[in-house]
Amino acid sequence: SQQGEEDPQALSIQEGENATMNCSYKTSINNLQWYRQNSGRGLVHLILIRSNEREKHSGRLRVTLDTSKKSSSLLITASRAADTASYFCATFLSYALNFGKGTSLLVTP
Amino acid sequence: ETGVTQTPRHLVMGMTNKKSLKCEQHLGHNAMYWYKQSAKKPLELMFVYSLEERVENNSVPSRFSPECPNSSHLFLHLHTLQPEDSALYLCASSQVLRGRPGELFFGEGSRLTVL
């Protein structure tokens, strides 16, 4: 079963703009992770936020977590063409990480 | 280079063939996973080997058979597949602590096409 769901499904912006994508999940979590996938490649871990954290930064990435709303957001600031990829949130369910369908981000020069 | 290597990267097979996908991790992790990624669908967890215990998604057909001979190697044996099994198969590894995985490290995937 799908635990996390990203929104929007697709996002198109220009270089220099900020990109925001959201994730909603269903059950209580210990932590939430964000991953990135370039077309046809494996997923790469971006950032992990624990349930007792509200915000976390890593370079141009900012992740927020609202456990009361069961939601998280990923903000990419000053986007670049190289940020074009799919972005997934993942939460632990049963015995492994469960992923959503992802947000497909296109950054045009 | 993530420390997880998958071979082959691309595989085309007929429905009557038998083939295997291979995954190797060099990270000293204690858990390995197979995920299936089809177009416009969420990643589907197929199998988990964690601390030498196997857990499987009951919806995975028996034509997929995993094998984990040690903590560094994982195989997915394929037998009499269907065209709808065409997908990207991703292997991942992680360190599991108190029953929960940390960050997953993925291989580049094996793109399977079933004719």
Image: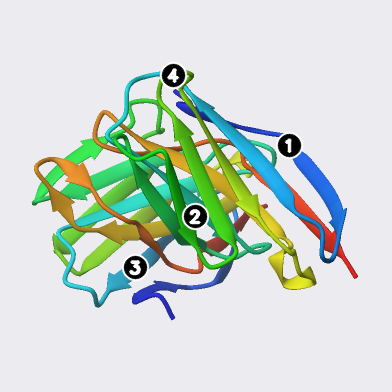
Mark 2–mark 4 Cα distance, whole angstroms, equals 26 Å
Q: Amino acid at mark 3?
A: Cys
Q: Quadrant of the N terminus of chain A?
A: top left
Q: Position of residue B38 (x, y in %)?
A: 61, 43
Rendering quarter of residue A51: top left
Which residue sits at x=20%, y=49%? B49
Tell me, yes or no, whether the two marked residues, 1 and 4, touch with CB atoms within 8 Å.
Answer: no
Query: Label 2, on which residue?
Result: B89
Q: Give the foreground label among 3 and 4.
A: 4
Tell me, yes or no, whether the two marked residues, 2 and 4, touch with CB atoms within 8 Å.
Answer: no
Q: Are marks 2 and 1 on the same chain?
A: no
Query: Label 1, on which residue?
Result: A9
Element type at mark 1: loop
Q: Residues within 10 Å of mark 4 (few under 14, many from 20)?
A: few
Mark 1–mark 3 Cα distance, whole angstroms, equals 30 Å
Mark 1–mark 4 Cα distance, whole angstroms, equals 18 Å
Image mark for residue B23: 3
Which residue sits at x=16%, y=48%? B50
Q: Is residue A102 above or below residue A87?
A: above
In this rendering, does residue B109 appear at all? yes
Rendering quarter of residue A67: top left
Element type at mark 4: loop
Mark 3–mark 2 Cα distance, whole angstroms, equals 10 Å
Q: In the shown orientation, is residue A87 left or right of residue A107?
A: left
Image mark for residue B21: none
Q: Give the foreground label among 2 and 1.
A: 1
Query: Label 4, on which residue?
Result: A26
Q: Amino acid at mark 4?
A: Lys
Q: Position of residue A42 (x, y in %)?
A: 52, 63
Q: Chain of mark 2?
A: B
Q: Are marks 2 and 4 on the same chain?
A: no
Q: Residues within 10 Å of mark 3 (few under 14, many from 20)?
A: many
